[in-house]
Structures are given as structure tokens and as C-alpha cells.
Amino acid sequence: MFLNQLNESNKERFLNLCGHAIMADNVVEPEEMEYLALCCYEMEIPNQLPDISEPLDKIVDGIVKDATAYEKKIISFELIRLFKYDGSYDDEEKAFMKPILEKFGIDTETHNQMEDMADKYTKIYNDICDLLSK
């Protein structure tokens, strides 16, 4: 939804961060790969598998160093959407997010609002799709 606003280096970092996020619960869900393809489309980059050879901490540190506060919020929100895309946001995924949010300077209240907005966005999007397909 907002990924096209990231600069090119942060688009690549986001994609690679998604690779680590997808593996957070040690299960690659087809829905997560579908969402990843949508993210690539939105960022106008080739649909590709993320490079998870770069350590997670290095990716996060690169975002902390180079991204604006707005980009960090976009990345955080879209990661939450990735996790929720398969219908769940389990404890392992929340544990994955916690240190990232802390490093990005995103407080618990904002995180909770992002979770709530991700749910609302998904519901509205699905309702629109249902309406259009009638």
C-alpha cells in the first residue's frame, strides 16, 4: 500500500527483511509468498525470492541508519500485514517484530494501532473485492 514510497535501497532491504520474517515461524505459507509477490509488484521490482544470506541484524541496522521515520513505519506496517496475510499473527512472529520495532523507535501503542489498521485494511479490501466480483 505504501511500499512504492520507499527509496530503492530500502525496497531491497524490505524484501530481504520479509525473507527473514517469512521464516520466523519456520513455516513458509503460500499466502506469505503471494503477499511477497504483491509487495514486489507495488515496489515495481522483479518478483524474486528474498536474499536471506545477509544477517537480519545487518538488514535492520541498514534501515535504522538510512530510512526516515516515515519509511520505518511503512516497513513495520507492511511486515505486520505480511504476518497477518495468512490469517494469523502468532507469538513467534510477534517476537520477531519486537526488537525491530524497538530499533525503529516504534512504541507499543503505535504497534497496536498498526495491528488494528492492518486488520481494518484487510477487511475493507476484502469487502471491496467481494462487491466488485458480484
Image (cartoon, rainbow, N blue to C red):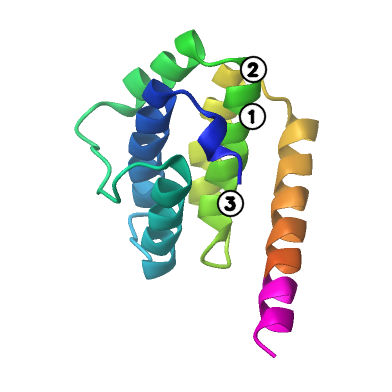
Quarter of the image for residue 122 reads: bottom right
Quarter occupied by the C terminus: bottom right
Q: At 58% across and 51% down in the image, what residue appears?
A: 81
The percent position of residue 43, horizontal first and vertical second, equals 44, 41
Quarter of the image for residue 19 reads: top left
Of 93 and 79, the residue lying toward us = 79
The percent position of residue 132, horizontal first and vertical second, equals 69, 80
In this rendering, position of residue 30 left or right of residue 120 = left
For the record, the magenta segment spans 126-134
**Crowd class of label 2 (few under 14; some 14 to 19; many from 20; radius 10 Å):** some
Q: Which residue is mark 3?
A: 81
Q: As shown in the figure, which amino acid type bears the numbered disc 2? A: Ala
Q: As shown in the figure, which amino acid type bears the numbered disc 3? A: Arg
Q: Is residue 127 magenta?
A: yes
Q: Report the disc number at residue 69.
A: 2
**Crowd class of label 1 (few under 14; some 14 to 19; many from 20; radius 10 Å):** many
